[in-house]
Amino acid sequence: MAHSNTCEIYELKQPRYYRYKSSIPFEEDTTHEFKCHTNLSKDELPPWTQIPESDKRTRNRVSKSLNAFLNSERAATVYLGISDDGRVIGLQLTIFKMDHIRFNLDDLFSRYNPTVERHRYSIEFIPVVEDDATDDEILKAVNFNPCNGVIDTQRARKHLLHTYKRCWCMADMVARSNNGILPPTYVVEIHIAAWDPSDTCNVNSVGHMNAPSYHEDECGKVYIRQQSASHQLSQRELYGIVRQNVNVYYSNMIRTLSEELKQLKSKRNDDIKPSK
Ligand SMILES: [Zn+2]
């Protein structure tokens, strides 16, 4: 599938940056996941990452972690360009590759059921500087505008999604590198916003309960986050969680109504007391 572009400018939130090979001061846990590639969905995983005659893979799609974070309702981040042991590696990206990742993410979430609303996620490209970078080099990296010198028609080309085959933006980046034009390095942060039942942007919440929906990913699977792992929910587990949420919601409502009823009865008794 191809996806058309719009010419969005990515404003780097300054002065954030990562130092190459530095260690991240936290581990993978209930709200952080590290990946060293940009294969979001199942159909982007190259066949050679699939172990023959097995369901095992040497590379996991990013979608699984994103799905688990969305269904776990907390604010969380997936970092692309950081190794499993928390070291900053970074990903070399041109503005075209950045566009590709952004459109790919939008496309992925449009394939979830229900689809993921735009206010539930955001993406940032944080520059990576050399481990011995000077203050001037850091300033240059955080002020670098990847759109410089790029004309809109170049960014209007359609990107190739839903496949492990190489998109034109990747071929373009390789050609630039071969000609000595090395693209800058970034860590891509995909942020999932916490579920906020009072947010008026929510359209997928469950009826008047305003409870979050559980999203199925592009493979029809539902995950939740448990410590540093994404756990796939069985139908039985999912039913149990939904039933518990409904019970909590109605128990609270019954408690509130009982309290109101008690107060009304008390008021009525006061009102019908014969006056002396
Ligand atoms: Zn592309």
Image (cartoon, rainbow, N blue to C red):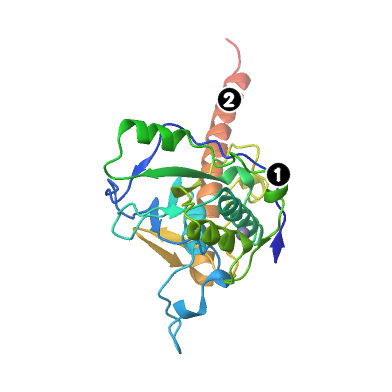
In the rendered image, which residue does mark 1 sit on?
A: 152
Neighbourhood count class around disc 2 (C-alpha, 10 Å): few under 14, some 14–19, many 20 upward: few
Q: Position of residue 257 (x, y in %)?
A: 57, 38
- The residue depicted at 47 percent of the width and 49 percent of the height is 188
Residue 143 or 201: which is nearer the viewer?
Answer: 143
**Mark 1 or mark 2: which comes first in sequence?**
1
- Residue type, mark 2 in image: Asn
Q: CA distance from mark 1 to mark 2?
A: 75 Å
Quadrant of the image for the N terminus?
A: bottom right
Residue 176 or 213: which is nearer the viewer?
Answer: 176
Q: Position of residue 68 (x, y in %)?
A: 47, 59
In the rendered image, which residue does mark 2 sit on?
A: 269
Quadrant of the image for the C terminus?
A: top right
- Residue type, mark 1 in image: Asp
Q: Dividing the picture into quarters, in which one does residue 97 lie?
A: bottom right
- The residue depicted at 61 percent of the width and 40 percent of the height is 149
